[in-house]
Image: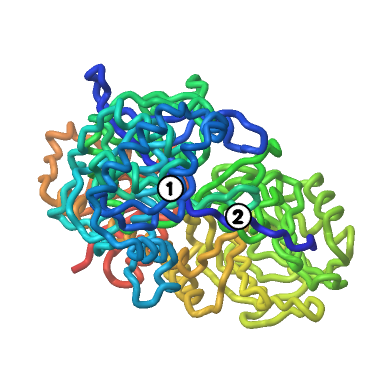
């Protein structure tokens, strides 16, 4: 196994998403994007980003502009013309800024020792017992506002208010939204660019601090005008990582952005959809793409703020790095099919995992489990059937679960990928995509087969005759560190088995549970009642992971089982309701007299619709209206399984072939 990799600690940071209506009057909204300069060592150079940056210690201060400034070292800085030149800040601008701050300081009536108390408040609340609590989210909001002023000269402030230097923080930014809470932003105070620009230059040069600049403008940071909409952490594997809070703000009253020309070299307002278009020419971070995509769904600025107000609490999202099908680095977010698996096999983000399942590629899922995907993708098999080698690390006894289809190339790949001698060839069931390769493998290596026989031959591998019939609860030892426990889970097939790797609490689920889709229950060998019972059985099993026959690893096996149970029961309720509604509608239509039917022979033309009966054709169209028509032949099998279950429970009765009536 690879040696441990040190993962960089994310730096707290914040970004501001400024919105405005399209000035042309067209529907929709625009968002401000800044272009970062391309600099050596900056992986985000050339990217289009939202204004933002790292949270500084000063951002944690709950300072009102009416309170005195922290005693920064700007007075000595301004006397040194060389430093001013090195910072590319005109000395005249700095002198104006310093003079304005000094005039504001003259009205302050605060003792110098209070300043030290304010500085102490920068520390986390847990490290400052008894002191004022400064919410981290408010510090992030102030950082976003400060960075916006520094990077593009846009100051989002509210009128100054008399307040103690360390007043309690108003519960605003991250408070749960109530129905009465406004979804429109507060009105920002106007800012004179001629007065603000010298302050920005001095701020960039480190001549003054942000509280001093805000106070000089007679404003306070507009924390209350921001909406917290996202919390993202840079994925592991990146040298410079950030723990970033994103805030939404209304930028319609702001002036023209002015960039510094050094760190930021461009600023423009974009419609989100245009920024995301392939021809935009923009280089975008993954998080920027996601947030722009969410904003593109908002009809206007008001809709965007309504969306923002609905997001509480805001979840934390940490993307993961991996490789795509062409071996290029990519980033995925929670919800991607490969999300859990990438985190399991490559937690440090070293690009050792892939976000697609490639046929014939051996993938180590743990020291005990190696997966090889068969080259049989399709509507019923997804990316292909997964074959799993299971055994003890460095052991000599390995089992192969689900050898897959009868494909000579796949068999050769399995033989080459085998980590050691095969002790068992196991099949979760005997459908054509799971067991047929067992014959060729057994002929090549001599390992015995094990599994169960199906009760019905329809749809089964006709050559599957296991050398050993496995019993429910039986254990197969594969060396000293790997034990498979057998679970008989009929439903999808009467002979369906799952295998629990006890040392990892990992379930090889075959077709009992699959990632991203439900399985077909096809009578007579498939049984819906047994399927639901087998699913409920899994809820009592100690499981942490699920390895399906189709798809990636799943980290929430119990949650998936509950979702499938709920889905099946909801579909069952829909079937029963449809039978009742269609039967009632048919009963309300009087039968046509023989004369009106032209004396047709029912035996010749087929039976006329019976009153009070629901046909399977009508049920299929109604119950599976949400399923593509191309899949209706497959859906019909599951419909029949639901109908047979309801019949066995005494809630329906058959009224002839493909005809059903409800029972009271």
Classify residue 201 by image quadrant: top left
Q: How is the image coloured?
A: rainbow
Q: Nearer the viewer, residue 148 or 238?
A: 148
Say few, some or many: other residues with alpha carbon within 10 Å of mark 2 (under 14 / 14 to 19 / 20 or more).
many
Using the image as rendered, state which of residue 620 and residue 323 is in the foreground: 323
Of all residues shown, which one is farthest toward the top? Answer: 24
Closer mark to the observer between disc 1 and disc 2: 1
Residue for badge 1: 14
**Mark found first going from the N terminus, 1 or 2:** 1
Q: Is residue 233 left or right of residue 196?
A: right
- Residue 335 vs residue 441: left or right? left
Q: Residue at x 35, y 43 (%)?
A: 145
The image shows residue 66 at horizontal and vertical percentages of 23, 51
- 264 vs 162: above or below: above
| 186 to 394, vertically: above or below | above
Taking the image as shown, residue 529 lies to the left or right of residue 586, namely: right
Residue 308: percent from left, percent from top: 28, 46
Whether label 1 touches label 2, CB < 8 Å: no
- SS at mark 2? loop
Instruction: Residue 457: tell me if it is visible.
Output: no
Q: x, y percentage for residue 475?
A: 70, 81
SS for callout 1: strand
Q: Which of the 4 image quadrants contains residue 99?
A: top left
Q: CA distance from mark 1 to mark 2?
A: 34 Å
At 77% from the left and 59% from the top, the residue drawn is: 438
Q: Tell me residue 33's x, y (percent).
A: 42, 30
Disc sitting over residue 552 in the figure: 2
* Residue 366 in sight here: yes
Quarter of the image with the N terminus in it: bottom right
Q: Give me the residue at 40% from left, 70% from top.
A: 125
- Quarter of the image holding residue 113? bottom left
């Amino acid at each position: 196994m690879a040696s441990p990799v040190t993962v960089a600690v994310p730096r707290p940071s914040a970004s501001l998403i400024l919105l405005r209506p399209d000035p042309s009057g067209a529907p929709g909204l625009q968002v401000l994007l800044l272009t970062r300069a391309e600099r050596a060592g900056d992986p985000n150079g050339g990217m289009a980003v939202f204004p933002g940056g790292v949270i500084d210690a000063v951002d944690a201060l709950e300072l009102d502009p009416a309170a005195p400034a922290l005693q920064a070292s700007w007075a000595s800085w301004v006397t040194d013309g060389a430093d001013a030149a090195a910072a590319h800040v005109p000395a005249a601008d700095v002198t104006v800024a310093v003079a304005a701050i000094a005039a504001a300081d003259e009205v302050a009536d605060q003792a110098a020792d209070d300043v030290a108390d304010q500085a102490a408040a920068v520390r986390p609340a847990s490290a400052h017992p008894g002191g004022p609590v400064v919410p981290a989210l408010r510090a992030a909001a102030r950082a976003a506002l400060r960075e916006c002023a520094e990077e593009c000269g846009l100051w989002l402030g509210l009128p100054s208010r008399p307040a103690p230097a360390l007043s309690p923080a108003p519960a605003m930014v991250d408070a749960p939204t109530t129905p009465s809470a406004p979804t429109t932003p507060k009105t920002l105070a106007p800012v004179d660019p001629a007065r603000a620009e010298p302050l920005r230059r001095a701020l960039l040069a480190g001549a003054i601090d942000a509280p001093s600049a805000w106070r000089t403008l007679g404003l306070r940071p507009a924390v209350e005008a921001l909406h917290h909409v996202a919390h993202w952490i840079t994925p592991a594997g990146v040298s410079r990582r950030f723990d970033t809070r994103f805030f939404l703000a209304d930028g319609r009253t702001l002036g023209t952005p002015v960039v510094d020309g050094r760190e930021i070299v461009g600023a423009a307002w974009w419609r989100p959809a245009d920024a995301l278009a392939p021809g935009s020419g923009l280089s975008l971070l993954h998080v920027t793409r996601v947030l722009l995509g969410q904003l593109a769904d908002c009809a206007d600025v008001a809709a965007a703020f309504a969306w923002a107000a609905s997001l509480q609490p805001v979840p934390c999202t940490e993307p993961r790095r991996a490789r795509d099908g062409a071996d290029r680095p990519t980033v995925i977010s929670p919800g991607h099919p490969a999300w859990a698996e990438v985190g399991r096999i490559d937690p440090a983000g070293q690009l050792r995992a892939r976000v697609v399942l490639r046929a014939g590629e051996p993938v180590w899922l743990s020291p005990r489990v190696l997966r090889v995907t068969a080259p049989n993708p399709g509507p019923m098999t997804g990316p292909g059937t997964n074959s799993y080698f299971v055994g003890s690390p460095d052991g000599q006894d390995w089992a192969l679960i689900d050898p897959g289809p009868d494909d000579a190339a796949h068999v050769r790949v399995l033989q080459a990928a085998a980590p050691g001698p095969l002790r068992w060839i196991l099949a979760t069931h005997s459908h054509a995509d799971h067991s047929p390769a067992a014959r060729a493998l057994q002929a090549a290596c001599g390992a015995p087969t094990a599994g169960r026989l199906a009760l019905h031959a329809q749809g089964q591998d006709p050559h599957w005759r296991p050398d050993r019939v496995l019993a429910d609860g039986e254990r197969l030892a594969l060396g000293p560190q790997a034990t498979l426990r057998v679970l008989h889970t009929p439903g999808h097939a009467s002979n369906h088995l799952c295998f629990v790797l006890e040392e990892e609490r990992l379930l090889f689920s075959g077709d009992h549970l699959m990632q991203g889709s439900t399985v077909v229950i096809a009578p007579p060998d498939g049984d819906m009642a047994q399927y639901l019972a087998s699913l409920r059985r899994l809820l009592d099993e100690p499981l942490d992971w699920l390895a399906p026959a189709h798809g990636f690893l799943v980290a929430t096996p119990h949650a998936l089982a509950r979702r499938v149970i709920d889905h099946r029961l909801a579909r069952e309720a829909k079937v029963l309701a449809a039978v009742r509604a269609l039967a009632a509608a048919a009963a309300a239509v009087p039968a046509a007299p023989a004369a009106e039917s032209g004396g047709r022979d029912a035996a010749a033309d087929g039976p006329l619709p019976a009153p009070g009966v629901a046909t399977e054709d009508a049920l299929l169209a109604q119950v599976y209206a949400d399923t593509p028509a191309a899949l209706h032949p497959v859906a019909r099998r599951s419909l029949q399984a639901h109908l047979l279950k309801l019949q066995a429970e005494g809630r329906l009765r058959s009224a002839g072939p493909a005809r059903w009536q409800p029972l009271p």
